[in-house]
């Protein structure tokens, strides 16, 4: 069960500015911040949704790529 939940979708975040924050939100009844990753301009983070992470929040200028398409936080 846990191993299946570790195979969540991947997403890619490319920072377009310094100090972009990628915030992981907990899965389950409580929806809380559990991790904040800071990216500087040009840095790329590749991550998955997991049994611990059901949502992410992005602060700052970035391009987010998922299987649903590409989103730019500035548009
Ligand atoms: N320990 C976290 C987890 O397994 C690591 C992680 C995965 C994460 N995806 C993330 C942290 C997205 C922040 C954002 O869920």
Image (cartoon, grey):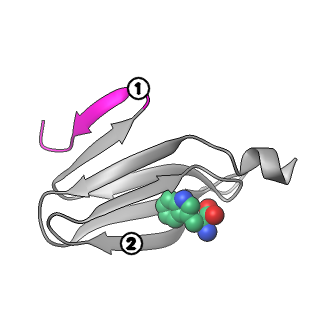
Residue closest to the far top: 68
Q: Is residue 71 magenta?
A: yes
Camera-nearest residue between 3 and 71: 3
Q: Secondary structure at mark 2?
A: strand
Q: Is mark 2 within 8 Å of ligand 1?
A: yes
Q: CA distance from mark 1 to mark 2?
A: 23 Å
Q: Residue at x 50, y 45 (%)?
A: 10
Q: Earlier in the sequence, mark 1 or mark 2?
A: 2
Magenta residue span: 67-75
Q: Is residue 32 visible?
A: no
Residue closest to the far right: 1
Q: Quadrant of the C terminus?
A: top left
Name the residue that disc number 2 marks.
37
Q: Is residue 2 magenta?
A: no
Name the residue that disc number 1 marks.
68
Q: Residue at x 37, y 49 (%)?
A: 12
Q: Answer left or right for 74 relative to 65.
A: left
């Amino acid at each position: 069960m846990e191993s299946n939940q570790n195979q969540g979708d991947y997403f890619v975040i490319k920072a377009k500015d310094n100090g972009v924050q990628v915030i992981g939100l907990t899965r389950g009844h409580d929806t809380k911040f559990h991790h904040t990753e800071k990216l500087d301009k040009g840095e790329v983070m590749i991550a998955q949704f997991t049994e611990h992470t059901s949502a992410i929040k992005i602060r700052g200028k970035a391009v987010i790529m998922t299987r649903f398409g590409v989103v730019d936080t500035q548009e």
